[in-house]
Image (cartoon, helix red, strand yellow):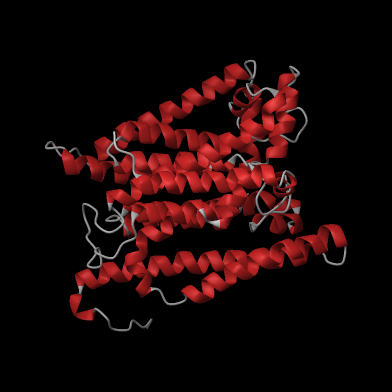
Amino acid sequence: MTIDRRKALLFGSAAAVRLLLFFAFPRLPDLLTGRAEISTPVTSFKRLQEGLFLYTHNLSPYDGGMFYQAPLLLPLFSLIPPSVFSLVTALLYVLTDLLCAHSAIQIAESGLARSSRLFSSPRKDIKWDSVAVSAAYLFNPFAIATCLARPTSLFSNCAILYAIACAVNRRPAKSMLTLALAAYLSLYPALLLPPLILLCHDQSVGTNDQKPNLSTSAFKLTSFFIGSLSWFMAMSYVLTGGSWEFLRSTYGVRLLLPDLTPNVGLWWYFFIEMFDSFREFFLGVFWLHLLGYVGGLCFRLRKQPLFVLMTLIGIFAIFQPYPSIADASLYFTFFPLYSHVFTLMRYTFFAMATILYATLLGPAFYYLWIYAGSGNANFFYAITLVWSLGLSIIVGECLFAVLRDEWEVERPEMKGKDVRRI
């Protein structure tokens, strides 16, 4: 078995950087754990520790009204001896990050971002090396900060990346199982099921002489996904002593938004100001808005299901109820895969400058509001709007570039010409 030296050096360097930050600056992880930009009520490591304390003392972890995470995380972390808890959790999160990077390498090596079963880009020769794609993730400051803060969203991100990696490598059953795990942990990854089914189907058609029907593939894969998710639910039911209380405390919190702790999303401030009589209506509107993208993107970009997955992940990083920079780092993982359409983007500098602006001023505005008392909630919400604007521009620009790339294949005489909206 040969070892890729470049990959080994990259993974070793990334692990060394993370472990150095963990142990050379022992206060840094605790500082980042409390940051609203990284930890949310449904992913916070501190809340996980609170639930773990109740669980190890034979109490319901949901009694305190602070733990909103999946029950199966508790036995995993309860196996760690208290004397080495910090060391083992640091190693666990570093290894999870490396698995994310390994999955990114597999996705990049498949080449599906440039040439799929139904579409081949005329710019497919322009590409980043798979190790460079992995390095872009491992040394992304957002990914490093997420690893140090130890939110449980990192496990969801890893499951999503691994599910996509399994799909491109023609392992549909493992892909559905891993996506079910991601949906079990975070709920919103269930919306990635339609494009992932399309991706699995396209990969199976490319190697199967029988050419299975899309409806048949969708039925089988959906059944496997639902069965896997039901299995996780049944295990949680047994773990919590035969109670379905965890459903209300995990998925109910994400759906109904009872905890309005500030984060980088758009929901919390809106529902703080919302009259209770309109709350249910706008919850429905916000969720329908999120759901509406799935069908439209799958239909319009049927030829490129991998890009549909990338775009939906970017949209969820903006519009889901409890987003964080961990969701943005997951979206940016896919960005180098589409380096062949970078030249078609128009406002990349403005978008990146907006993201940098919000990244630098976000902590300052939060400090002015919460600690200094010289600002109010509008300070922090204003900068989260700037953050969402930057992400929206990047998602929109990438979508425009890919659609322009498709259009130039259909109408080669328009290559290089300006496009105007009429």
- Image location (x, y in percent) of residue 32: 70, 49
- Image location (x, y in percent) of residue 164: 38, 43
- Image location (x, y in percent) of residue 29: 69, 45
Q: Is residue 317 left or right of residue 210?
A: right
Placement of the C terminus among the 4 image quadrants: bottom left
Q: Is residue 9 left or right of residue 69?
A: left
Q: Is residue 191 visible?
A: no
Residue located at (59% from left, 64% from top): 388
Residue 124 falls in image quadrant:
bottom left
> Camera-side residue: 144 or 180?
144
> Camera-side residue: 295 or 159?
159
Q: Is residue 259 visible?
A: yes
Residue located at (20% from left, 74% from top): 411
Residue located at (36% from left, 69% from top): 401
- Seen as rendered, the residue at the extreme left is 209
- Image location (x, y in percent) of residue 250: 63, 35
Residue 337 falls in image quadrant:
bottom left
> Camera-side residue: 139 or 411?
139
Residue 283 in the image: above or below residue 85: below
Q: Is residue 265 left or right of residue 308?
A: right
Residue located at (31% from left, 56% from top): 113
